[in-house]
């Protein structure tokens, strides 16, 4: 595997000015998270551990796809999965797919965490999700981006009518 892919919808791409960065208030904050007994995700067998650890954050980042805020960004080695997320499964008409070089990510000191190496039950196993964390816990360096591809979905699943009208 030489590349990871990230798909974002057009709105997020514009909001972040084409940058790859965490979407949350956790941007700029260190990656490890605390988990304590009684937390909703402190489930036996989930892989989380008591206290502060990177392990916890990797698991929480992808937990039930609930959008737990972390300083990481999701990627996949499978380009079609990035396309799926860029177009939100067919709900969006436009998006972008970033191609990131693993070698360049490493040279830029970006940590790469493969979810299935941490989570007992990944939320979406077919994504083979890899979480990227910049060394400053913010933007992924532009030097690691090989390409940014604009994509369009000509047929939206929510508005396509074979006869050409809604009647």
Image (cartoon, rainbow, N blue to C red):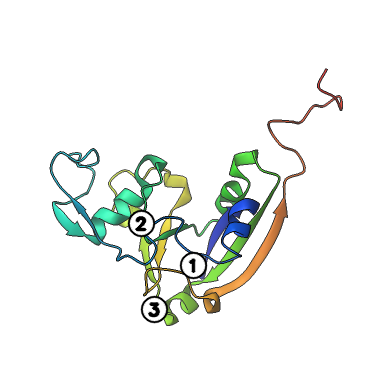
Q: Determine the residue located farthest toward the bottom in the rendered image.
A: 107
Residue 97: % across, % down: 62, 59
Is 20 situated left or right of 31 in this image?
Answer: right
Residue 45: % across, % down: 20, 41
Q: Residue at x 57, y 55 (%)?
A: 7
Could you say whether the residue bearing mark 2 is in a helix, strand or loop?
loop
* Cβ atoms at labels 1 and 2 below 8 Å apart: no
Q: Determine the residue located farthest toward the right in the rendered image.
A: 164
* Cβ atoms at labels 1 and 3 below 8 Å apart: no
Q: Residue at x 54, y 69 (%)?
A: 100
Residue 146: % across, % down: 60, 73
The front one of 42 and 5 is 42
User: Can you tell which of label 1 and label 3 is closer to the viewer?
Assistant: 3
Q: Identify whether 107 is placed above or below 65.
A: below
Q: Which mark is residue 109?
A: 3
The residue where tag 1 is placed is 1
Q: Residue at x 85, y 24 (%)?
A: 165
Q: Which mark is residue 37?
A: none
């Amino acid at each position: 595997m030489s590349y990871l892919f990230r798909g974002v919808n057009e709105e997020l791409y514009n909001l972040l000015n084409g940058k790859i960065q965490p979407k949350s208030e956790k941007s700029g904050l260190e990656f490890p998270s605390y988990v304590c007994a009684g937390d909703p995700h402190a489930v036996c067998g989930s892989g989380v551990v008591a206290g502060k650890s990177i392990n916890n954050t990797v698991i929480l980042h992808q937990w039930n796809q609930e959008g737990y805020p972390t300083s990481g960004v999701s990627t996949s080695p499978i380009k079609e999965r990035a396309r799926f997320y860029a177009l939100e499964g067919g709900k969006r008409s436009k998006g972008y797919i970033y191609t990131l070089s693993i070698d360049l990510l490493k040279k830029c000191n970006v940590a790469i965490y493969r979810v299935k190496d941490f989570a007992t039950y990944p939320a979406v196993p077919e994504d083979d999700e890899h979480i990227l964390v910049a060394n400053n816990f913010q933007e992924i360096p532009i030097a690691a981006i090989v390409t940014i591809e604009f994509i369009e979905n000509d047929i939206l699943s929510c508005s396509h009518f074979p006869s050409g009208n809604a009647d």
